[in-house]
């Protein structure tokens, strides 16, 4: 693609075609766009091309700063955060190249008719996610946008079997190795903390109540993600703050009075309690779609109860009372993981 032929669409996206070559202005870093994937020499990589709009470019520069710090602290890529290979400017577009990964944990579940992940697979995925995000926390970072779309499989190949009981074909992953991606909203402890972070369904109560947030908001998000893997659907399916808080109370009991006293969002409360009408249509919706956490347990096998004990600690209202990821990794739910599955260096297949 010659400089004279470089075009952006009206929203600032780079217009490109299969076979185009992106060339680094300062060297010979070439990427050929072929069949929807990107080639760098003999290897295939993922390429993120940022819109040629200043606010997006500034966000990309901040993301590159985070990715460079991750690379510096984890040169061997053992902590399961996506690895950045390079970044460069292409005619006003910030471009970032990454290791090429497979489907997200959300997309795999979607393509599998939203079937939950088997508990053994969920356990290995959960351990990796907690390990990766703990690494961020240890380096004074909060991801702030953890969700199933931002957890990608290294390889999403699967085997198919027929479930005679449910009369359907089901997919089972061959390998549950994952990477945490998308550091566009990641925030260092010393940086400005936006009032609102996280995608709605994974947003912690302290964020909604604008009480300030730090690393524990990631733990809440992971709790929501793991419950979604277990159930096959999003728990807090709402777009309204009041309804979201009502759902949280339905699952985890009343919001602590300490948080209610501290929040500036007093419009959500009346006489120290959530100002919520359970008999309204919204109230009925919450009642029908949410229930106390332990009532979601699908089996009386001890592993399932161990998972819900872990989730209970991750979905604790008060951030200072919420489990740290270090505590999560030592939880009994993970005690049956083989040593190889605990090691960040080894990603073994996990059978059903």
Image (cartoon, grey):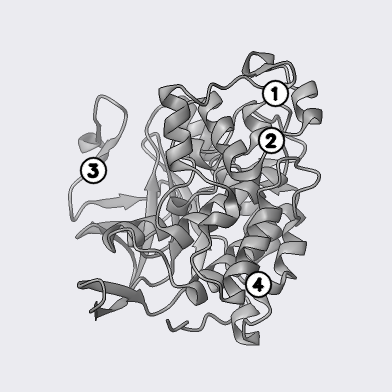
Give residue 265's quadrant in the image: top right
Distance from disc 3 to disc 1, alpha carbons, whole Å, reads 63 Å
Check residue 249 in the rendering and tell me which mark sits there, or answer none: none
- The location of residue 208, given as percent across then percent down, is 62, 29
Residue 315 shown left or right of residue 42 in the figure = right
- The tag on residue 254 is 2
Does 335 sit above or below residue 100?
below
- Determine whether label 4 and label 1 are within 8 Å by CB: no
At a point 44% along the width and 48% down the height, the residue shown is 234
Query: Which residue bears the numbered disc 4?
Result: 333
Element under label 1? strand
Mark 2 is surrounded, within 10 Å at the Cα level, by few (under 14), some (14 to 19) or many (20 or more) other residues, namely: some
Evaluate if marks 1 and 2 touch, with contact meaning CB atoms under 8 Å apart.
yes
Q: Which mark is residue 2?
A: 3
Locate residue 196 relative to residue 193 in the image: left or right.
Answer: left
Q: Nearer the viewer, residue 17 or 324?
A: 324
Where in the figure is residue 192, as x and y percent of width and height? Answer: 70, 29
Residue 228 appears left or right of 292? left
Q: Earlier in the sequence, mark 4 or mark 1?
A: 1
Q: Residue at x 39, y 55 (%)?
A: 106
Nearer the viewer's eye, disc 3 or disc 4?
4
Q: Earlier in the sequence, mark 4 or mark 2?
A: 2
Mark closer to the chain start, 3 or 2: 3
Disc 4 to disc 2, C-alpha distance? 26 Å
- Name the residue tied to disc 1: 273
């Amino acid at each position: 693609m010659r400089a004279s032929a470089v075009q952006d669409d009206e929203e600032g996206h780079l217009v490109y075609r299969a076979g185009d070559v992106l060339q680094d202005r300062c060297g010979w870093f070439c990427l050929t766009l072929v069949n929807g994937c990107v080639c760098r020499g003999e290897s295939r990589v993922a390429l993120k091309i940022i819109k040629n709009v200043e606010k997006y470019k500034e966000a990309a520069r901040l993301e590159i700063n985070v990715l460079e710090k991750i690379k510096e602290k984890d040169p061997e890529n053992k902590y399961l955060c996506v690895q950045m290979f390079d970044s460069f400017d292409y005619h006003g577009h910030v471009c970032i190249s990454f290791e090429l990964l497979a489907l997200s944990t959300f997309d795999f579940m979607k393509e599998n008719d939203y079937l939950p992940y088997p508990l053994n697979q969920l356990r290995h995925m959960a351990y990796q996610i907690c390990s990766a995000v703990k690494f961020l926390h240890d380096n004074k970072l909060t991801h702030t946008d953890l969700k199933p779309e931002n957890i990608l499989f290294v390889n999403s190949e699967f085997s198919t079997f027929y479930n005679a009981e449910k009369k359907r074909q089901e997919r089972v992953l061959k390998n549950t190795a994952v990477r945490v991606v998308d550091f566009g909203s990641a925030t260092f402890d010393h940086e400005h903390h936006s009032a609102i972070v996280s995608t709605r369904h994974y947003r912690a109560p302290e964020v909604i109540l604008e009480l300030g947030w730090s690393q524990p908001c990631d733990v809440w998000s992971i709790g929501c993600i793991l419950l979604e893997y277990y159930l096959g659907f999003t728990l807090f399916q709402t777009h309204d703050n009041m309804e979201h808080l009502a759902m949280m109370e339905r699952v985890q009991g009343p919001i602590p009075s300490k948080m209610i006293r501290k929040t500036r969002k007093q419009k959500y409360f009346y006489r120290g309690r959530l100002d919520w009408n359970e008999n309204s249509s919204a109230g009925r919706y919450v009642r029908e779609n949410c229930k106390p956490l332990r009532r979601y347990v699908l089996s009386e096998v001890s592993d399932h109860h161990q998972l819900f004990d872990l989730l209970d600690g991750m979905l604790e209202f008060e951030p200072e009372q919420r489990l740290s990821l270090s505590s999560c990794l030592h939880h009994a739910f993970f005690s049956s993981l083989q040593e190889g599955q605990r090691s960040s260096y080894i990603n073994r297949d996990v059978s059903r």
